[in-house]
Amino acid sequence: MDDNDLIFADEDEDDDDAPREAPWQVLIVDDEPQVHDATRLALRSFAFRNRRVEFLSAYSAAEGEAVLRRNPDVAVVFLDVVMETDDAGLRLVERIRTGLHNAIVRIILRTGQPGQAPEEDVIVNYDINDYKAKTELTTEKLFTVTVAALRSYQDLVALDLSRRGLRNIIEASASLFQQRSLRQFNTGVLTQLSGLLNCGREGILCAARGDTRGSDPDEFYILAGAGEFEKLVDRPLTSTVDRDVAAAIRCAVNERHNIYEPNYSVLYIEPPNHRELAVYLNTGRFLSELDRSLIEVFCSNITIGYENIHLYEKMKQLYEQLKIAHEATIVVLADLCEYKDNDTGDHVMRVARMSGEIARVLRDQNAFPDHIDDNFVEQVATASILHDIGKVGTPDRILQKPGQLTDEERAVMQQHTTTGGNILNRACRMLDGKTYLSLGREIAFHHHERFDGSGYPSGLVGDDIPLAARIVSVTDVFDALTSKRPYKDPWPRDKAIDYVRERAGSHFDPRVVNAFLTVMAVRSPESESG
């Protein structure tokens, strides 16, 4: 026996010098108990990167698979080829890689019958890291093979953690970017950082250099809080949190860099609007280099997110200003119609309110899921104001006639639908997509169509009539019936409701009538007179 055959030698070991880090897990799969004993003996004093080895044993391929299922952190497997069958070890390799989906554990095949399976074929056809005859694995070579396997395993674990971390960053960023509220975004930053670092949900996000009102340029204010800090939102930092926490936050902002301590971290963020932010996290541990790298990437995304929120809020303000301008224009157009037909009073505004209420009920009833959303509910109310815009082309002698119209006069009056539709059609060409103007065009053209096809100007039937026009058809008739006109007195409210109900399916869409009746059941009569 030469010096290399020390695999069965015995040495004393000092347990007092064992490192505190969790040991590497090494699994021995072999049907010969003496092989287990020899491997443990050879590596009993082994340590790699200040971590010792913990051995697990299995005496068949099936038992080895069960051990791996229970212990997914096994770093190295010493695997015998021939056990319960001649190729049991090779079959286990396939199970580990494809069945357990474990591509990280390092597998070293050992065989006592090296001629049974050619080494080249095994290495090429199976996802293993080494293939050795048991007689080759002396103490020295076993040490070398184990070090190489653990080094490879650790590198793969680091790569896998980086991949998972980057995936978490992408998912967290995507979740944050869906937020359109700055308050929700701030809270989301804390939540996603806690999840990314797998630490307790205890933290603060602060704005430096003044609160949201700018009342104190030297104070830090809490914009979001988690855990014990959750109730401190919108309050000044220095008067609400521990002095050491406040000092750490101020230090990070003043020095413009992150602070990493054993139990907490403070992250410095400077959004594009130059309003400095700081995030304090009670991590409960010292963050690793990988954690810090991931935080750097995530904070870059946070900066982009704050810029998006800032731009969104500016666009929202601009949209609201444009919306007010558009609505004012519509009201002016409606007033123009009423100027010629002043007996209608606030008719168009009442129609607008009731049309919006009916559309909201239809949405809640999920009556037209392909047509009605929040945008439709808002736009149909505005667009309905334009339903009689075509009356600007109707002669005053017809509009203001106190008696019944002749057939000829009625034909002229009916032209207000096509006149209004054509006016709005020209305006719609200037805009893309579904807008209040395009809905207004549909309403102006078709609010006098009837569900059974007997209406005008096109004689459309049922669902061929645009939904917005079907809604306004009900509200326009109801309001006309309950309003005083030159040729009639107002109808009682209940009589007008009965009129609409009785004509469901003929004049009106039954689904719209059902929503109208729901609105009437909760609507006060006073709301129909203003």
Image: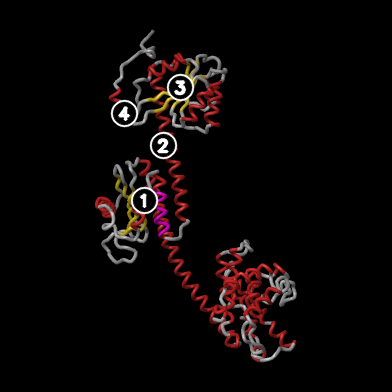
Q: Residues within 10 Å of mark 2 (few under 14, many from 20)?
A: few
Residue visible at 69% across and 82% down? 415
Please report whichever mark, 2 or 3, sits nearer to the chain's N-terminal start: 3
Q: Is residue 104 above or below residue 45?
A: below
Q: Which mark is residue 57?
A: 3
Q: Residues within 10 Å of mark 3 (few under 14, many from 20)?
A: some
Report the span colored magenta.
183-193
Query: Which is closer to the viewer, label 1 or label 4?
Result: 1
Please report whichever mark, 4 or 3, sits nearer to the chain's N-terminal start: 4
Q: Which mark is residue 227?
A: 1
Name which residue type carries label 3: Ser
Q: Secondary structure at mark 4?
A: loop
The answer for how far apart the CA atoms under marks 1 and 4 are is 35 Å
Q: Residues within 10 Å of mark 1 (few under 14, many from 20)?
A: few
The answer for how far apart the CA atoms under marks 2 and 3 are is 26 Å
Q: Residue furthest top?
A: 1
Q: Is residue 461 above or below residue 203?
A: below
The answer for how far apart the CA atoms under marks 1 and 2 are is 31 Å
Name which residue type carries label 2: Ala
Residue visible at 34% across and 42% down? 287
Please report whichever mark, 2 or 4, sits nearer to the chain's N-terminal start: 4
The location of residue 233, given as percent across then percent down, is 35, 58
Quarter in which the C terminus is drawn: bottom right
Q: Secondary structure at mark 2?
A: helix
Residue with the mark numbered 4: 19
Question: Can you see residue 4?
Answer: no
Residue with the mark numbered 2: 158
